[in-house]
Image (cartoon, grey):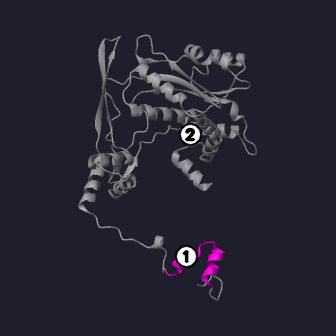
């Protein structure tokens, strides 16, 4: 057996000693022209059974069902019904599980299902949402990033004492619901979704106010209006003070910095004086249309995804479920999101104030 870089052959035992492997291994490989792992096996010809599974997989991902939820409203003394459309087998794992259930045994894996769907020219598609940014918004975002980012020390503030806050509407239509659509766009148009997001008579809605920080989190339910119409909730400065701001008097920490958007109720004179009186600093000049810069938006997405899986809810049950999922998020996840605030600012600065989308984050990750 010839050793690379040597003109004279090396005995098998010497090769085994230098490679630190058994002598039988060297003897086996010396008699083979190519390693077994490198031997190309021909794919078996498609059978009638595999063609049936392929057609069934494509049919399952394109099947939609209607989910109807009915709940008796005590005040109105009538049942409220909402209907929404879902894809019961939207993921490749669900498709493989359904095919194996119908066959009565394990006949297909999720990787095989994914290969079938790609061969059928399908791809997983989620409608991407992004804020509409004017040139004024871009300039404000860029100035905000330049102000907080120091060229040498990173962030000019201590991220460990920053608390991010925001309001959020919840209903059973929230979350990332995806479906399998043709990979090629139709000529002169856009992809059409088979999953309707509209509802009959409107779903029960819930408005909450949340705050997250390292070692700190809080969730408050914003009550409905006096006439019982949850859609008519208005958080004025007095409601914001009573529900959200005043509890900070008991739970404030030394040097806490509170982040809030530029809503009129947040910037009211009474609210500003209250925070100054109890010694809480606010992160001023937060740019408008900037949900992609706030880590709490990722927390809302996690909770909304869990709400979507469960289907229709009433307002009280929805609040209990949202509170449970919000408090069950691991503390390590919250800390990782807050630590990523500096990276969001740097990506926004690199985009000259543009939106920090998933494509921008992935491109920056590959550049690193």
Q: Quadrant of the N terminus?
A: bottom right
Residue 73 can be seen in this image: yes
- Does residue 24 show up magenta in the picture? yes
Say whether residue 193 is left or right of residue 134: left
Residue 300 in picture, x, y percent from top left? 51, 32
Specify few, some or many for label 1: CA neighbours under 10 Å numbering under 14, 14-19, or 20 or more. Answer: few
Q: Which residue is drawn at 65% across and 19% down?
A: 248
Q: What element carries label 2?
A: helix
Which of the two marks, 2 or 1, is nearer to us in this view? 1
- Residue hosting label 2: 135
| Nearer to me, 28 or 83 | 28
The residue at the point 65 percent across, 32 percent down is 214
Mark number, residue 265: none
Camera sees residue 173: no
Name the dominant secondary structure of the magenta segment. Answer: helix
Q: Is residue 76 above or below residue 53?
A: above
The residue furthest right is 152
Residue tagged 1: 24
Magenta segment: 10-31
Q: Earlier in the sequence, mark 2 or mark 1?
A: 1
- In the displayed structure, 237 sits above or below 156; it is above
Q: Where is residue 173 in the image (x, y as percent from the top left)?
A: 39, 31
């Amino acid at each position: 057996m010839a050793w690379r870089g040597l003109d004279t052959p090396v005995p098998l035992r010497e090769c085994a000693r230098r490679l630190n492997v058994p002598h039988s291994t060297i003897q086996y490989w010396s008699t083979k022209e190519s390693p077994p792992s490198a031997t190309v096996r021909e794919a078996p010809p498609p059978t009638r059974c595999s063609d049936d599974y392929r057609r069934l997989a494509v049919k399952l991902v394109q099947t939609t069902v209607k989910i109807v939820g009915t709940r008796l409203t005590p005040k109105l003394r009538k049942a409220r019904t909402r209907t929404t459309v879902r894809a019961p087998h939207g993921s490749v794992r669900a498709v493989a599980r359904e095919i194996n259930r119908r066959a009565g045994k394990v006949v297909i894996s999720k990787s095989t299902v994914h290969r079938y769907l790609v061969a059928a020219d399908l791809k997983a598609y989620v409608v991407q949402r992004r804020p509409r940014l004017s040139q004024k918004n871009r300039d404000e975002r860029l100035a905000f990033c330049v102000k907080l980012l120091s060229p040498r020390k990173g962030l000019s503030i201590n991220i460990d004492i920053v608390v991010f806050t925001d309001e959020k509407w919840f209903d059973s239509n929230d979350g990332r619901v995806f479906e399998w659509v043709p990979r090629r766009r139709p000529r002169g148009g856009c992809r059409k979704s088979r999953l309707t997001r509209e509802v009959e008579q409107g779903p029960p809605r819930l408005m909450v106010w949340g705050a997250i920080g390292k070692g700190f989190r809080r969730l408050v339910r914003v009550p409905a209006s006096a006439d019982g119409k949850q859609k008519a909730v208005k958080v004025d400065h007095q409601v914001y003070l009573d529900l959200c701001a005043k509890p900070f008097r008991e739970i404030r920490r030394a040097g806490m910095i509170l982040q809030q958007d530029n809503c009129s109720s947040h910037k009211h004179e009474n609210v500003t004086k209250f925070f100054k009186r109890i010694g809480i600093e606010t992160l001023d000049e937060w740019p408008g249309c900037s949900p992609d810069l706030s880590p709490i938006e990722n927390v809302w997405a996690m909770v909304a995804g869990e709400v979507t899986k469960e289907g229709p809810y009433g307002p009280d049950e929805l609040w209990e479920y949202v509170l449970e999922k919000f408090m069950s998020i691991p503390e390590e996840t919250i800390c990782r999101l807050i630590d990523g605030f500096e990276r969001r600012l740097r990506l926004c600065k690199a985009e000259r104030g543009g939106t920090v989308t998933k494509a921008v984050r992935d491109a920056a990750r590959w550049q690193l």
